[in-house]
Amino acid sequence: MRGLPVPRAALAGLERYNPEAGACPLDVSDNTSLWGPSPAAERAVRLVSAQSISRYPPADPRALCAALADYAGVTPEQVVTGCGSDDVIDCTLRAFAEPGEAVAFCAPTFSMLPTFARVNGLRPHGVPFRPDGDLDVEALLSARARITYVASPNNPTGREASARALEQLLASAEGLVLVDEAYGEFAERSWVPSLQRFPHLLITRTLSKAFGLAGLRVGYGLGAERVVAALALVRGPYKVNAVAERAALAALTEDLPWVRARTAEARDVRERLAAELRRVGLSPLPSGANFLCIPVAHAASWGARLLARGVRVRVLRALPGLGDALRIGVGPWDSMEVVLAALRAVVAEGLR
Ligand SMILES: *Cc1c(COP(=O)(O)O)cnc(C)c1O
């Protein structure tokens, strides 16, 4: 008898990404848009001709790349799309490192990054952030990694890397530097203008957060033409489906004022929420994203008590250098008042 096929050794111990789900009146746990989708994208989804779905979408969505290029301020040849920016990150690891090589990053960061490294046969090499919360550039450089990953703003902390640290990293890194700007729209600064100076810089972005289109799975990478061409090769054709392509194009061509208004509102709400949290005695970290990270003791108890009050937040346990924390997505102020009322009630029960 033949035994069951055994998966590759690198997969041992990896767990599937499976966040807590299920019905909850207010879910602020996943950083998606609490303002809903871009209205133009929603209209496009309704109007897409059902006939068109019997055929493949464009293998390389040129119109979409052109619209993304306009939005980002680069040329269409500098854009590669994917099934979410997850897909672009995964392809980057496969395209630019040989099995066994290292991917360096400061921890804690995007939880999928070490998993993507392992499933691609690479070695995740996490180093701590500096005590002040900034990138530890020396430690990243001393890993001499083929790929260095920096999420700015970072998830789950919300912090932006300082310009000084990231400049220094870009000036000295030998391998590819992947800057993940999933939350770039909410931040002080984007690194897209620096593409001109650094051919080894690749930036990933997404329509999942500021555009409110997480369910459609559209992400993109921006970089030097030859870098982007390698990613398109590794990715393969048809990763942006026909419906997503129409909707993304509609959002980018008709709805940028809507996106900019919601983004500005999210930034205002974030600062207002942070001030209210401090009044309650909590200490949110500075954030350049559409969420706040709040270190607490016993995050699991907080999570359970908030859930009992109809609010789901992300519970983060034992983050390196930070310990337990809660991550709360920002949305329209009336929903933030619901979150605050639940938090105040938990504080009144004596939890800190
Ligand atoms: C949400 C997120 C992404 C993006 O995901 P998509 O696959 O584009 O939906 C990428 N990086 C970070 C850090 C994120 O938080």
Image (cartoon, rainbow, N blue to C red):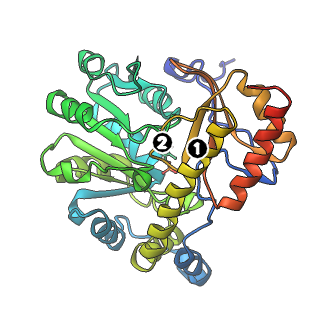
Quarter in which the C terminus is drawn: top right
Q: Residues within 10 Å of mark 2 (few under 14, many from 20)?
A: many
Q: Nearer the viewer, residue 287 or 92?
A: 287
Alpha carbon of mark 2 to alpha carbon of mark 1: how far? 9 Å
Residue that appears at 52% across and 18% down: 320
Residue that appears at 49% across and 73% down: 258
Q: Which residue is mark 2?
A: 287
What is the secondary structure assignment of the residue under circle 1? helix
| Residue 220 at x, y percent in the picture | 38, 55
Residue type at mark 2 is Ser
Residue 91 in view (yes/no): yes
Mark closest to the chain's N terminus, 2 or 1:
1
Residue that appears at 39% across and 23% down: 132
Mark 2 vs 1: CB contact within 8 A: yes
Q: Is residue 181 left or right of residue 215?
A: left
| Residue 239 at x, y percent in the picture | 45, 57
Please determine whether, in this image, residue 333 is positioned above or below residue 101: below
Quarter in which the N terminus is drawn: top right
| Residue 169 at x, y percent in the picture | 22, 30
Residue that appears at 48% across and 39% down: 158
Residue 217 in view (yes/no): no
Q: Which residue is mark 1?
A: 274
Q: Is residue 109 left or right of residue 141?
A: right
